[in-house]
Amino acid sequence: MGFRNGLMATGLALLLAGGAMAQADEARAKKIVNGVCFLCHGAEGESSSEIFPRLAGQHWEYVAKQLDNFKSGKRKSTAMADMAAKLTPDEMVSLGRYFEKQSVATEPAKDAALAAVGNYIYQNGNKFSGVAACAGCHGVAALGTNNLPRLAGQFAAYIETQLKQFNQRERTNDNAVMHSVASKMTLLEMAAVAEYLSGK
């Protein structure tokens, strides 16, 4: 009986310690966000401009990976490299977890006709030009995976810019598949897919 009670007490202590660590990590992440990130990405990942990605609801693993890639130079951005240079791996994870917990803003696409074209391309691809269906990797609902970004609700302007950067080999990470896909897309297809995703 004493051994069992000892195990239960140890388990409870570990659980409480884990909860305290999680609270400390979130407090640290919030401090970093309110000190630096909010200027571009908003205090809750809602973003202050369409040129900056919304981070609310994004998978924490993906956010942490991108921060690490900015820090290492694998993904190019002078502004983000400077920000990420000061972050530890634990802080990158904490920031990812913080943004993942935030509510995702949703609003209808601004151009319904363009979004309809984008919906078709996203779900089915374009068999005439060889463009693959985006849903094959990012999911039918565009929610992504641990390693692939959530695209639903992202700003159209940001998605379109990223597709162009993949096409022109200006985005230097996550490029094995995306370079191949984006290189086959027309500017109309990029704009249409981006418009569709912005309204999901």
Image: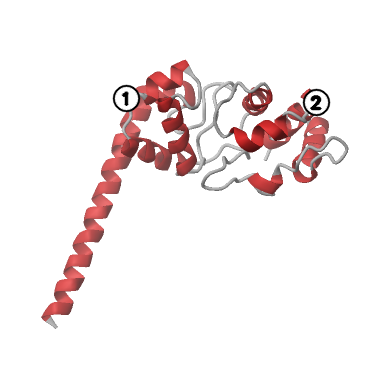
**Location of residue 169 in the rendering, given as x and y in whole percent from the top left corner:** 63, 23
Q: Is residue 111 left or right of residue 160?
A: right
Task: Tell me the residue that label 1 is attached to.
Answer: 86
**Location of residue 200 in the rendering, given as x and y in whole percent from the top left corner:** 67, 40
Q: Is residue 107 visible?
A: no
- The disc, 2 or 1, on the residue closer to the chain's N-terminal end is 1
Q: Is residue 185 above or below residue 147?
A: above
Residue 137: which disc? none
Disc 1 element: loop
Query: Where, by quadrant of the figure, is residue 4 drawn?
Result: bottom left
Q: Is residue 46 visible?
A: yes
* Frontmost residue, 32 versus 64: 64
Q: Residues within 10 Å of mark 2 (few under 14, many from 20)?
A: few
List the single residue furthest toward the bottom: 1
Instruction: Name the residue type under label 1.
Output: Lys
Query: Where, by quadrant of the figure, is residue 115 drawn?
Result: top right
List the single residue furthest toward the left: 2
Alpha carbon distance from label 2 to label 1: 39 Å
Which residue shows up at 32% across the image and 39% down it?
A: 90
